[in-house]
Structure formats: C-alpha cells, structure tokens
Amino acid sequence: MSDAVTNQLDRFVHPLADVATKIIGKDTRVWQFVVILDGAKIGSECNVCAHVLIEGDVILGDRVTVKSGVQLPNGVRVENDVFIGPNVTFTNDKFPRSKQYPDKIPQTILRSGASIGGGAIILPGIIIGEAAMVGAGAVVTRSVPDRAIVVGNPARIVGYVGMNDERSIGLPKISKARKVQGKTLMFRDANENDAAFILKLRTDSQKSRYLSSTDADLEKQKAWLNHYAEQNDQAYFIIETLAGEPIGTVRLYDAQADSFCWGSWIMKEGAPQTAAIESALMVYAYAIDHLKFMAAHFDVRKGNESVWRFHERFGAQKVNSTELDYLYTIDFNTIKEAHKKYRKFLPETILVLE
C-alpha cells in the first residue's frame, strides 16, 4: 500500500486495500480488499468498492463508481460519470492462452455517463457509447451506440435513452433520404418516373435469374412506386453517377430490432467497375452511421455465386440456407473493418439530404 496515497487527507484508501498507484484524484474512496496496480490512473470523486482489481494500464475518469467484484484489466478506459455494476467482467484478449500474451492490448472504452449492469461481460476492444445502458448479465460482443439500451447474450439494442433520461421506445428505423452522396455515386429516392428503368433491369434475362419475379406491365410498376412513396418502412434507391446517369437500384427494408435487410441490388451492363463495392459501402454507411443500425441480414440465391462471394469477402457470415438461398448476417464491427479495408472507395462520411 502506498503511503503517498494513504497520507493524503482529501482521499480515502482503506487500510486493507493494496494500492500501488500514486495517481488517485481528490475525494476518491477506495475500500477494503481492492487491488490497484502501479500506473493506474484514478480520477476525482470516484468510489471503488470492495474486492475490485484494477491493473496498471487502466484509466478512470472523474465521478466513476466501480461496484464490488469488478475486474478492470489493462486497456480499459473509463470516462467521467460512468457506473460499473457488481461483478462486471472485462476481457482484453480475444484468444487467451495461458502464458501467451497478445502483441497489443486492445482498448475497451466506456464513454461518459454509461452504465453497466451487474454481471455483464464486455469483450475486448468494445466501445460503450455515451449515456448507453448495458443490462444486467448482458454479454457485449460489439460496440454500443450512444444512449442505446442493450440486453441479452449476445447483447442487442432494445431501446434508447432519450434526453433528460427519459427512455424512448424506438429502435432504429429505416427512413428514406432524398439523396445520399458517396465518392463517385449518388443514391436517389425512387419515384414513378423511374418505373421504365427499374422494369428494364428487373426483366433483363440475365439479371432476373436471381430475383423475385416481376410483372412486365409498366403501369403496375408505376403503381408499386406510388404505393412505395406512401410507405415509411423501407428505402428504395436509384443508384446514379454524380453526373446523374442511372446505373442500378438498391433497397433497404425489413428492420428487425437493430438489424436491417437489403437487396434488389442490381447494376446495369456497363456500370463502373467500382460501383458494386462503393454502393455496398454506401448502404452500410447510410444504415449504420446515419440510421444507427448495428447489423444487417440478407439472402442471396445459391446460384448467384459472384454476389455471395462478394458478401463473404466483405465479412458476412453464412448462418443458414433454404432450398434456393443462403442466409447471411454481418455485424457492426465487421462492417467497420470492411470500411477501413476498402476506404479508398468511399470517403470518411456520406452526405445525406433528407
């Protein structure tokens, strides 16, 4: 136990605590049987309850509460006003082996005002967003957006904390945008005037092999688009070049909790070679960054090998199959890694005009 700590009257360290660090802020209280290793940084007005372990490469901000039975391993970064409930477990090695250590410890970050319920497990490299709430016993396998409420194993979003700590009941919802601009492409909300272009794509003998059947009646296609204009549960985009030339379509639909489905992804002959990967990145940027979904699900016809191989290179996981289709999911972290991998095809942010 450090005399430099215990002798300072503006903070309290219980005599049965084992505290090696000298960096403890004013008015912080450390209770019995706590172990804090040298190098850890503890902010002001914190409360570290009994039977807590804090390793040396850990930083706690101000006014942090750490309840009993918590282990904070190297790499954990806790911002101000965070609550960590009893027996919460943090991990810092994705593939642990005895006496074998990772070359680099991933940082796990708890943003300001976040709350972690008792018994939750937080995997390495996770970011818990500002004012987010993790339910008791949740197993958090991917990052949590600001103000999201997550529960379960694996943890899923079930709502959001609204302003003034009033909970909203809304999950992410699919909404339309007038335009979404990427690096070389633009998504434009489809309308009745696009009926002929859409029908030509969907009735093409080569492309229609892997699509649900479409009636060749132009008036029916117009009627469908007029009906779509009145709906609020999907987004159907015409993919254009920045010069305004239509080259394809894509649709977002079937929101399920924090996951969305996308499909009707068709490119006309002669579309730029990079259009497929840029448009896929734009779909994910719009749904994940703008609409705040955390995952996607979709199906691909088994015979459409070039498309399902594309998704698998992107990181999508095959989770099931039917007689005709493979069923896929892709999660938040994998989408973010894909964006980094293919960064040259899309700028840091998309421009959304609603």
Image (cartoon, grey):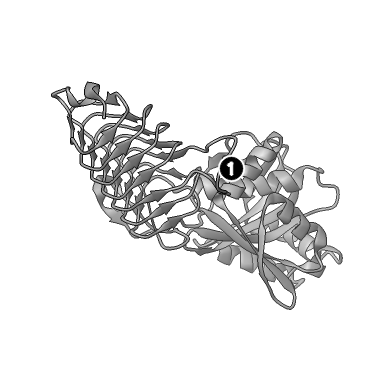
Q: Quadrant of residue 265?
A: bottom right
Circle 1 residue:
100
Query: Quick check: 284 left or right of 184?
Result: left
Query: Quick check: 83 left or right of 120?
Result: left
How many neighbours does mark 1 have within 10 angstroms: few (below 14), some (14-19), or many (20 or more)? Answer: few
Position of residue 129 measured from the top left corner of the image (x, y, whole percent): 40, 43
Residue 151 visible in rendering: yes
Residue for point 64% across, 38% down: 340
* Nearer to us in this view, 121 or 159: 121
In the image as oriented, which residue stretches furthest toward the left? 9
Q: How many marks?
A: 1
Task: Note whether 56 is above or below 187 in the view shown.
Answer: above
Residue for point 45% across, 59% down: 156
Position of residue 251 measured from the top left corner of the image (x, y, whole percent): 63, 58
Query: Quick check: 149 left or right of 310?
Result: left
Residue for point 29% across, 23% down: 22
Task: Note whether 255 is above or below 283 in the view shown.
Answer: below
* Nearer to us in this view, 47 or 343: 47
Q: Quadrant of residue 211?
A: bottom right
Residue 177 visible in rendering: no
* Nearer to us in this view, 271 or 131: 131
Amino acid carrying mark 1 in the image:
Gln
Position of residue 100 measured from the top left corner of the image (x, y, whole percent): 58, 42
Determine whether the residue tagged by mark 1 lies in a helix, strand or loop.
loop
Task: Note whether 46 is above or below 320 in the view shown.
Answer: above
Name the image quarter holding the N terminus.
top left
Position of residue 66 measured from the top left corner of the image (x, y, whole percent): 28, 43
* Nearer to us in this view, 298 or 237: 298
